[in-house]
Image: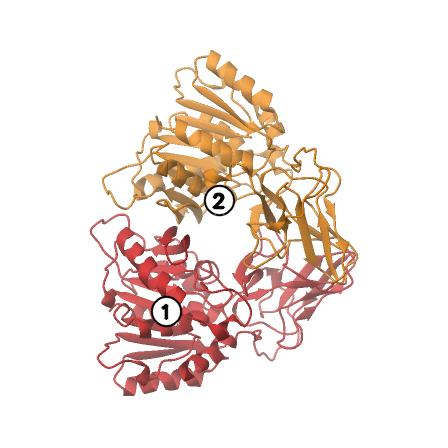
Chain colours: A orange, B red
């Protein structure tokens, strides 16, 4: 149970709001609407330093706060302005990338009507994007695009049809003789199978890597990993069996039967972020005959003793943000390498337990897979 | 311009909240969470009569209202209850099926934190489902399921990659020699390309019809139809050219090149709901060489004079809810039939300008296509 607890400690450390450190004391007034706003909405806005500014209409409210802001200080308090709406700016610049947030109106939890919604914290949260210096790798470009397909696969163990999203690379429908390796990629606690496409831009990351010739095309399959009952604290009593059954006994055979996959261990990888990393670790260790490449993204580490005798692991990829526990990730990779296992660690500079870390991690992981 | 205005009048009549008529004066206390609630959320609830009950946490608010309720009376006013939250029940039963709504908290417009969000009214709105007596035809069943694929297609005219969703029927990936007809299916004003799958269950309607042997499989393609600037009143200056260019010159060639379609006029249909009907009418009349089957769902009518000499239309399908203008739809179909055109009208009983009308309309339209 030791490895389980250590993984949990990292997986649960997801409550810090990422604030970037900066020396700037004046706020530059070049605020623009966040790229994740609903069509036509002016707020929330972001400036070139990474400050976020909010404007919420609630003329008769007594108190409006936004959860985004300095950790431990209750987010950002908005103040009433002349037109009757509420406005406020974060106390400091936010970390680059995607952040979840919500709005407290007179004690109730709502979303920002100006922002798009993203599933996280077992609710649809508002999302805001702080433009990152390296945003090019997940930008929508004029390159051939793969597809993200919604499939409904039969699940006898849960007595329903379950949803998954399947990324197929550009050209998948062209050459009908070509078969592809598959990465099974899991979201974090409180998220669902929409997270890697919506928040993570996994499809655009792949399209761009393929267009640049940096990877051989492969497929990605994303499904819902919280097969157990959903509640806060539920991780403490986490039983991997229900999800492992859905993934290994139901989803993988369905994907292999309905897509042109290379349906063997050496062409099958599993990775996950946060809780999805915990699941990846448990399932890859339980089912060494199914996966050959493992990735934990802010989701704990493997130690050499975790790998059973005789099991050949082609790759272990460990990553996290520099604001998480980078030393734990780096030292785990070193220990694995010393034991003769092909391990790679990656630290995302200046980011915390948030999606910019995981976008970058996928971008680093993809070229290492299936070589 | 006369046909344009008449179509507009119907397309714009989308503000009535559908309240079912009933003699019941007592509310039966068998409320259950709406099937469209976020995972684990107890409210909103619906009872067997179709009443909706809301519970919103906002302990320090002065006023909380829900937009759903009797038309013209400002929805449903919630009252504060013992635990500090706000509760209320609609004054009467709601029409069967899907309804958009939002919550007014102290004068601000928010969504219900308990409900899933659906894009309508150019914002992500809360959604609630009043179980319908005929819900079986769009239920998730243990039958073979097709896929809903997200594609990004290049659009030179708008200088970007645009998103569409493509429904491919069960077995599409199995028999690589089989080709399929295609229905291009448009959403209404303020909605987007997610509406027909999320609110409409178009994929489940197709899966079930195919499983019952009631239709030959075909594909459905859904893309964003508001290529023009998005604002209230924008319909008045609606120019079909930008969207027609995207659909006919960019999307259709892309779909024909990347999917196994039967790429000719007689195997290509276009239909749309509300504003999407208006678009369907304009594009099918402008481009008679592209589509052979036309469908307007609460989206106006064709008159015999609209069809140019020498154009053979295989089907005109006209529908609306019985609470809209059913006589206009029926008399238009009669006039078309008298002119020798294969026209079919369908009236959805007890529904208004809402998605239950359009789910039923698709269910009626599908078996008539491509015969």
Query: Which one is nearer the viewer's eye here, B308 or A277?
Result: B308
Q: Quadrant of residue B155?
A: bottom left
Q: Residue at x 34, y 30 (%)?
A: A267
Q: Chain of mark 2?
A: A
Q: Position of residue A249 (x, y in %)?
A: 39, 37
User: In the figure, A239 relative to B61: above or below?
Assistant: above
Which element carries disc 2, helix, strand or loop?
loop
Residue farthest toward the left in the current orientation of the protein = B177
- The answer to whether residue A203 is seen in the rendering is yes
Observer-side mark, 1 or 2, equals 1
Is A129 placed left or right of B171 in the picture?
right
Residue tagged 1: B271
- The answer to whether residue A239 is seen in the rendering is no
The dot on residue A227 is none
The C terminus of chain A appears in which quarter of the rendering?
A: top left
The dot on residue A193 is 2
């Amino acid at each position: 149970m030791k490895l389980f607890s250590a993984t949990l400690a990292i997986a649960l450390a997801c409550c810090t709001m990422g604030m970037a450190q900066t020396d700037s004391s004046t706020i530059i007034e070049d605020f623009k609407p966040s790229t994740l706003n609903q069509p036509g909405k002016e707020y929330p806005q972001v400036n070139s330093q990474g400050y976020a500014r909010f404007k919420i209409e609630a003329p008769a409210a007594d108190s409006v706060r936004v959860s985004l802001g300095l950790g431990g200080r209750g987010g950002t308090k908005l103040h009433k302005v002349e037109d009757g709406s509420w406005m406020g700016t974060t106390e400091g610049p936010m970390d680059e990338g995607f952040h979840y947030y919500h709005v407290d109106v007179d004690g109730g939890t709502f979303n920002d009507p100006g922002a798009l919604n993203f599933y996280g914290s077992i609710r649809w949260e508002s999302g805001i994007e702080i433009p990152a210096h390296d945003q090019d790798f997940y930008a929508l470009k004029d390159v051939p695009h793969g597809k993200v397909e919604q499939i409904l696969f039969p699940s006898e163990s849960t007595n329903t049809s379950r949803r998954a999203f399947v990324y197929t690379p550009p050209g998948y429908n062209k050459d009908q003789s070509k078969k592809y390796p598959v990465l099974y990629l899991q979201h974090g606690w409180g998220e669902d199978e929409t997270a890697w496409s919506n928040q993570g831009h996994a499809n655009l990351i792949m399209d761009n890597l393929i267009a640049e010739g940096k990877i051989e095309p492969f497929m990605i399959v994303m499904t819902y990993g919280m097969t157990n009952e959903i509640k806060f604290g539920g991780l403490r009593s986490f039983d991997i069996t229900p999800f492992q059954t859905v993934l290994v006994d139901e989803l993988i055979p369905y994907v292999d039967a309905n897509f042109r996959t290379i349906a063997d261990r050496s062409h099958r990888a599993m990775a996950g972020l946060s809780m999805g990393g915990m699941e990846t670790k448990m399932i890859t260790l339980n089912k060494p005959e199914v996966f050959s490449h493992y990735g934990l993204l802010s989701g704990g580490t493997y130690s050499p003793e975790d790998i059973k005798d005789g099991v050949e692991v082609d790759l272990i990829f460990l990553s996290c943000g520099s604001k998480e526990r980078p030393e734990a990730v780096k030292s785990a990779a070193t220990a694995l390498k010393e034991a003769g296992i092909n391990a790679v660690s990656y630290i995302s500079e200046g980011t915390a337990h948030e999606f910019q870390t995981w976008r970058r991690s996928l971008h680093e992981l993809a070229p290492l897979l299936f070589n």
